[in-house]
Image (cartoon, grey):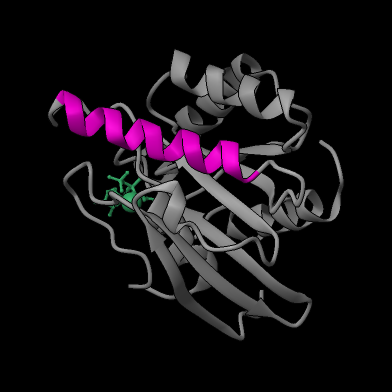
Amino acid sequence: MKILSAELVAAAARAEDFPRPGPPEVAFLGRSNVGKSSLINRLVQRRRLAHTSTAPGKTRLAYWYRIERPRGPLLLVDLPGYGYAKVSKAERHSWKALVESYLDSRVDAKRPLRAAVLLQDLRRDLSEDEELLVEWLAEREIPVVLAFTKVDKLKPMRRAQRVKELGASAQLPAGRAIATSAEAGDGIAELWRVIDSMVGAKVA
Ligand code: GTP
Ligand code: MG
């Protein structure tokens, strides 16, 4: 994948500060520490574009990264993760509100949100949070791909078994569940192919 440039163009803590709709947006959603920022870096081949951390709760704002490729611009949107228990209730609430207001505001008339990448650690089972997100996106006809993360942490046999198990429980169309590793590079080319097909398509 040829990436001509990648840069941070906006960061916001609340809807009033969101940038005006421009190029198509692809949202990265998932539990805290699942690997959203790392996967964005791997996709755009920049090691330190999005900030990552071994401690959950690193990304606290919504970040828009503008990617230029020969086929045109795209915005990858890094969002805070949900489900991290070790923060105050108020803080948890504000993250949830931010992700929800992002999703609500980006499916309006101009529909800048064209696709979502839902990340899931291959070692964990899907929770109600992921199920609700898949449902929410389906209701709004936003195509979604499930990216299993950190697959380098599992032996090949176990990996294949988990992909099968979790893929079946997610009930997504064929080809919409991909095993990835931001560390080792697995699934990155395939994920780009799916993202581009989703962004190009009007509905899921
Ligand atoms: P929040 O911003 O807190 O929501 O987290 P995040 O989903 O952005 O996770 P982040 O990319 O910061 O990664 C969390 C931790 O997982 C970091 O220590 C990463 O190095 C590690 N990690 C991410 N992807 C991979 C992967 O593919 N393989 C391995 N082994 N570790 C990974
Ligand atoms: Mg992050």
Q: Give percent across and percent down for residue 40.
A: 47, 60
Magenta span dominant secondary structure? helix
Would residue 83 appear left or right of 70 to someone viewing this image? left
Q: Give percent across and percent down for residue 152.
A: 40, 46
Depicted 81 relative to depicted 167: above or below: below
Q: Residue at coordinates 55% horizontally, 25% vertically from top-left?
A: 133
Which residue occupies the foreground of this view, 159 or 54? 54
**91 inside magenta stretch:** yes
Q: Residue at coordinates 68% horizontally, 46% vertically from top-left?
A: 115
Q: Which residues are magenta?
A: 89-106
Which residue occupies the foreground of this view, 129 or 11? 11
Q: Give percent across and percent down for residue 24.
A: 70, 60
Q: Residue at coordinates 75% horizontally, 82% vertically from top-left?
A: 70
Q: Quadrant location of residue 178?
A: top right
Q: Residue at coordinates 64% horizontally, 19% vertically from top-left?
A: 135
Identify the image quadrant of the N terminus.
Answer: bottom right
**20 inside magenta stretch:** no
Depicted 150 relative to depicted 88: above or below: below
Would residue 70 appear left or right of 92 to someone viewing this image? right
Residue lying furthest bottom: 4
Q: Is residue 47 visible?
A: yes
Residue lying furthest front: 16
Depicted 95 relative to depicted 16: above or below: above
Identify the image quadrant of the C terminus.
Answer: top right
